[in-house]
Image (cartoon, rainbow, N blue to C red):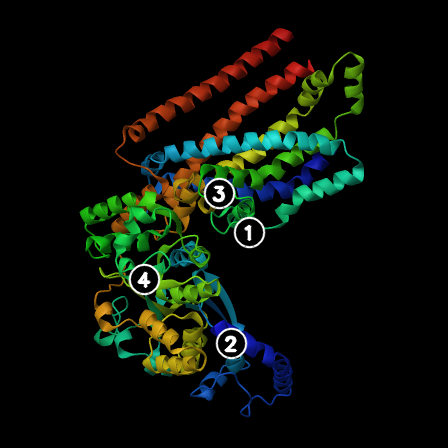
Amino acid sequence: MNNKKFKILAVPYIVWMLIFTIIPLALILVFAFTDRNAEGFRFTFDNIQFAARYLPVLIKSVYFATVATIICLVVAYPLAYIMSKMRLNHQRTMVMLVMLPMWMNFLLRTYAWMSILETNSGFLNRFLSIFNIGPVHIMYTQAAVILGMVYNYIPYMILPLYTIMIKIDNRLIEAAQDLGCNTYSVFRKVIIPLSFPGITSGITMTFVPAVSTFVISQLLGGPKNNLIGDLIESHFVSGGEYNPYYGSAISLLLMVVVFICIGIFNQFDNEEMEETLK
Amino acid sequence: MKKLYAFLLALVFTLPSVCLTSCVVEEEEEGEDTSGAYYDVEVDDISYYEKFRDKNITINVYNWGEYISNGSEESLDVVGAFEKISGIKVNYTNYATNEDMYAKFKSGATSVYDVVIPSDYMIDKMIEEDMLEEINYDNIPNYQYIDEKFKSPDYDNTGEGGTAKFSVPYTWGTVGIIYNKKYITEEEASTWDILWNPEYKGQILMFSNSKDAFAIGLKKLGYSMNTTNMEEIAEASVLLREQKPNVQTYVMDQIFDKMQLEEAWIAPYYAGDALTMIENAAKNDIELGFAFPKEGTNIFIDAMCIPKGSRNKEAAEAFINFMCELEVMTANGEYIFYSTPSTQAKEMILSNMEEYMSEDEIERYLLISYPDEELIAKCESFINLPKDTNELIIRNWNDILIGIDEDSWWNKAILPVSIIIALGFCILIILLRYRKMQKKRARY
C-alpha cells in the first residue's frame, strides 16, 4: 500500500528519464546503424566499421581518463577524510570551496588554465622567470590534458567521498583502536572498507565524463592530443558535413567501452564489500 | 589608435549623450516620432521603414559573432538604429562557423530565423538543398549601391541573366598570412611554404577547419581548392600531415590572443581579422604584418539571405535594405574591417578614416582589405563540392588531426585485437559473477 503511494512519486523522474535518457540513447542506436541516401533510411554496418578506425583514439582516451581518475582519487581521498573530521562550520566552508569552481563554466576555466600555462606569456612562466627558471613547456602536452581533466572533475570525486566519510561512525574507529589496531590498520580495515561505496561512485563519476572529455583536450592538448570526444564533436558540428551517423557510431563504441570498464569495476567492488562486511 | 580616439570621444560624450537619449525616449513616448523625429541614421526613404511601425513585428537575425557594428566604442548600433526607425524588434544571435549554422538548420531550426549571413559555398549548398527563400529585390532599393560585379556571384547565379536570386552581399575578404615582423620578413611570408618551414617549428598556427586547411594545401600544390580529383586531395592530405609536427596548434578564434601575445609567429587567417589583430598587437608593442601568398588564396563573400519558412519576409527584406544603407555599410565596414561590396561605401569609409588614422594606416588598410586586381585574379572562392568530396576531405582532416595512419599494421590489427579483448573482459565478468553466485549458494 505504502509502496504504491511512493511509486507515484517516481513518475516525474521516469518521464524525465524517458525523454532525456532513453529516447536519445535509442536515437544514437538507430543513427549508428542507419544511413540516409536518396531512397531514405537503410540499415548498415558501415558506420560501426568506420568508427572502428578510431579505436586507437578511444584507447588513448581511456588511458588519459584512467590516469586522471587515479590522480583524482589520490588527491581527493585524504582531503575528503580531513574535511569529514573538521568542525561543522569549517566543513561547510570547505564544501563551498570545492564547489566554487563549478559555478563557472568549464570552458572559461579551461581558458584560464591556458593563460596560466602559455609558454611565453603564461602566468606560471612569468612567475618562474623571476627566479630565473627557464620556461617550462606544459602547454600542448599530455600532462596539460590530464591536468585539465583532474582540475575539472575533482569535485565529482571529493563530494561522494566526503558524503560517505561523514557518515562513518566514530565509535567504530574507537572500537578498532580499543581492540589493538594501530593508525594504519584502522585506516585499512575500517575507513577504507566503509568508504568503499564513495570510492566507487567517485571513480564512476570522474571516469565517465573524463573518457568523453572534449574541448579541454583541444585547448590544452593541441594537435597531438585530440580525444574521442573531440572526434564525436567534429562529426556533429564542424567540418562541413553534418553527419550524425558516424558521430553516433563512435558514441556507441565509446558507450560500449565505458560499459565494459564500469562492469569490470563493479564486480571488483561487490566482492570487496562482501568480504569486509562478513 | 582608433580605439583610443573612440575612448576619448566616449568620455567626452558620455554625459550629454545619456541626457540626449533620455530626451529622445521621452519624445517618442509623447508620440512625436512620426513628424520627422530624431533617428541615428539618415536613410533615403523613411516611409519605407515607417510602414512597419506599430505592427508589432519581430524578426530573428542570425549572424557571425563580432560581425556587425554594435554601438561599442562610439560606433553605430546598427540593430538598435533599425529597431528605432522601423519599430521592428530584432532578436540578434550569433554563430561561429558556417557549419554550426548549417547543423542548427538541419536539426530543425529552419522556421525560426528570418535573416542569415552565410558564406559563398554555404549559400550554394543551401540553395541546392532548397533552404533559402527568393528575395524580392524590388523591396531592397538600396541594392543599387552594391557594385555590379557582386550582383552575379558564382554561388548564386540562377536569376535572370546570371544574376543573384537569393542573396545580398554583406562583406568580402581574402585569406592571407599574418606574421610577426620581429622574426619574419614580408618576402618569406608571401608564400604558403612558410607554414611548412621547419625553422619555425612550434610557432605556426593553422586553421582547425577542414575547408580552409585543405584550401591551403591544395593552393600550395598549385591545384584548384575546389578540386574533386581524389589524387589531388590525397596529395594535399600528405602535405598537411607533413606539416603537423611544425604546427603549434589548430585554432580559429583563439588566433587573436596567440598572435597578439606573441605566443605564435605565423598564422593564416582572414584579412579583416588580420587588421584587428595588427591594431591590437600594436598596443602590446608587437608588430604584425599581413602578406598575400603568391600561389593565390581564397576570396570569400558573406551574403545576407532569407531562410525558407521566414514568417516576416518583408520585414527581413527591410532589415537587409537597412544593412545596405550607405551609412550603415560604412559603419559596419569601419567597425569589422572586412571589405564592403559597395564602392560608394568604401569611399565614405576612407574619408571617415582620414579623421582618425594616419596615412600609413589607411594605406595598410587599403592594401589588406582591397588588394589590387592582379592579386584578386589569382584568388579563388569556394563552391559547394559534391558530398563524396566533402566527406573525403573531412575524413582525411580528422585522420590528420587525430593522428591516424590508415596503412600502419597497428591500425589493421587493432579491430580484431580489441574485439577479442572486449570479449575476454565480458567473459571475465560473467565468470566472476558465476563464482560469486556459487559462493553465496555454498553459504546457505
Alpha carbons under labels 2 and 1: distance apart: 31 Å
Place residue A93 in its image quadrant.
top right
Mark 3: give few (<14), some (14-19) or many (20+) Cα within 10 Å.
few
Q: Are marks 2 and 4 on the same chain?
A: yes
Mark 4: give few (<14), some (14-19) or many (20+) Cα within 10 Å.
many
Q: Which residue is mark 4?
A: B175
Residue that appears at 57% across and 13% down:
B437
Alpha carbons under labels 2 and 4: distance apart: 29 Å
Q: Are marks 1 and 3 on the same chain?
A: yes
Q: Which residue is mark 2?
A: B5
Alpha carbons under labels 2 and 3: distance apart: 39 Å
Alpha carbons under labels 4 and 1: distance apart: 29 Å
Q: Are marks 3 and 4 on the same chain?
A: no
Q: Is residue A244 above or below residue B118?
A: above
The label shown at residue B425 is none
Pair 2/4: label in front: 2
Q: Which residue is mark 3?
A: A134
Chain under disc 3: A
> Cβ–Cβ below 8 Å for labels 4 and 1?
no
Q: Which residue is mark 1?
A: A108
> Cβ–Cβ below 8 Å for labels 2 and 3?
no
Judged from the image, the secondary structure of the residue bearing numbered disc 1 is: helix
Q: Residue B238: x, y in percent?
A: 25, 44
Number of numbered markers: 4
Residue that appears at 25% across and 46% down:
B239
Pair 1/3: label in front: 3
Three-letter code, disc 4 = Val
Q: Residue B322: x, y in percent?
A: 43, 79
Chain under disc 2: B
